[in-house]
Structure formats: C-alpha cells, structure tokens
Image: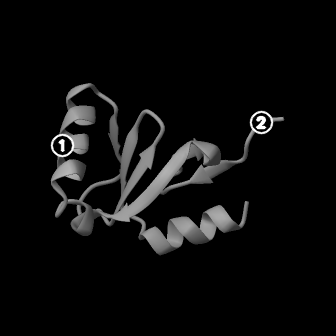
Amino acid sequence: MRAPGLDIGGGVMIPAESVVCVLPWQQALKSRSNRDLVSSLRARGRMTVIGEGNHRSLVICDNEIYLSFLTPATISLRARRL
C-alpha cells in the first residue's frame, strides 16, 4: 500500500514517511550543521524551494530538503490528519 502524501505547500506532495523533521527556517539557519546540510544538498540539486519570498519551514527528508512558505505548525497539522 502506498504511503499517504503530505502537502507541504504549493501543491508539493511528499511521502509522509520520508519526513525526518520540520524546522522553522530562521531557527534552522542558526545551527552550523543545518547551514552545512542546506549548502551541501543545494549544491547537489537536492533542495526544492516552494514559492517565493517569506519562507517559514525547512522540511528535511531522507535524501532531500524543501523550503516551504507554510509554518512548521501547519505542516504538522496536515501530517496529523493523514
């Protein structure tokens, strides 16, 4: 059976089981290890930016990261509804 998809904004659906964590974007940038992770995955083409402007969440998955305009609370609420 296929895992349910999680809408993380802009109609982007990801497998819910692939999500490792969802962090507030500005808080995530305060950690050097998070900045290194973002830089590394961006350089390898494993980062997807959803929408433009005020990004609020860093969604870390198994092998990819997403920058979303939704808040971590909204993404969490959507995940709990699955």
Residue 82 in the image: state x and y as whole percent: 73, 59
Most extreme residue toward the top, as rendered? 44
Which label's residue is closer to the chain start, 1 or 2? 2
Residue 23 in the image: state x and y as whole percent: 37, 63
Provide the secondary structure element on which disc 2 rests.
loop
Rate crowding at label 2 as few (under 14), some (14 to 19) or many (20 or more) other CA atoms within 10 Å: few
Q: Is residue 82 left or right of residue 46?
A: right
Residue type marked 2: Arg
Q: Is residue 50 above or below residue 2?
A: below
Residue type marked 1: Asp
Residue ID for mark 2: 2
Q: Is residue 49 above or below residue 52?
A: above
Q: Is residue 34 above or below residue 55?
A: above
> Is there any visible trace of residue 10 in the rendered image?
no
Question: Which coloring applies here?
Answer: one colour
For the residues labelled 1 and 2, the Cα–Cα distance comes to 32 Å
Q: Is residue 52 left or right of residue 32?
A: right
Q: How many marks?
A: 2
Rate crowding at label 1 as few (under 14), some (14 to 19) or many (20 or more) other CA atoms within 10 Å: few
Q: Residue at x 38, y 43 (%)?
A: 65
Residue nearer the viewer, 6 or 18: 18
Provide the secondary structure element on which disc 1 rests.
helix
Residue nearer the viewer, 63 or 53: 63
Residue 5 in the image: state x and y as whole percent: 66, 47
Image marks 1 and 2: residues in contact by CB distance under 8 Å: no
Q: Quadrant of residue 70?
A: bottom left
Q: Quadrant of residue 1?
A: top right
Q: Residue at x 40, y 36 (%)?
A: 64
Q: Residue at x 29, y 27 (%)?
A: 45
Most extreme residue toward the right, as rendered? 1
Residue ID for mark 1: 36
Which tag is nearer the camera, tag 1 or tag 2?
A: 1
